[in-house]
Amino acid sequence: MQVQPYLFFNGRCEEALDYYQRALGAEVLMKMRFAESPEPPAPGMVPAGSENNIMHACFRIGDTEIMASDGCDEGPSAFEGFALSIAVASAGEADRCINALADGGQVQMPLQTTFWSPRFGMVTDRFGIGWMVNVIDQPEGT
């Protein structure tokens, strides 16, 4: 059994994929637009003018695959009640991740020493997704 996050960006999925490629080195594994579907959507399911929106995408950050879509709803996405956690190997990588995710977003907890990690911090990105960045194996001298 495997659990994978599936994020709905309500019209901003393409922007999100580009952002995560730049910010976190994400690799887009697949992307299908509504217009590319082998079966047409049911009448009224896809709002008019949304044919080029992302029906389904999959991207990888590190060893984790995340699925994403523009969805069929209109209005802003509401990402509440969860956060995605990134485990990195060094303080430098934690700094890079927090700074990249804070671009257009907001730091909730600056990186700091905790009892479980030499560097831990939290940020909400420009799409409203919460991220926790955690150093799990800090090499000597960093």
Image: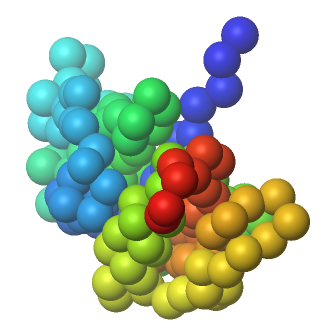
**Residue situated in front as seen by the camera: 98 or 37:** 98
Above/below status of 107 relative to 66: below
The answer to whether 82 is drawn above or below residue 45 in the figure is below
Q: Position of residue 127 (x, y in %)?
A: 43, 73
User: Quadrant location of the N terminus?
Assistant: top right
Left or right of residue 81, residue 75 in this image: left
| Residue at the farthest right position | 115
Q: Is residue 13 visible?
A: no
Q: In the visual, does 117 lie left or right of 133?
A: right
Residue 48: image quadrant is: bottom left
For the point 60% across and 86% down, the residue is 110
> In the image, residue 54 lies at what x, y percent?
25, 45
Q: Return the residue nearer the eye: 35 or 59.
A: 59
Residue 21 in percent (x, y) is at: 22, 53
- Residue that appears at 60% across and 45% down: 137
Depth order, front residue of 28/39:
28
Q: Above or below — where is 102 with respect to 45?
A: below
Question: Is residue 19 visible in this depiction of the protein?
Answer: yes
Residue at position x 22%, y 28% in the image: 30
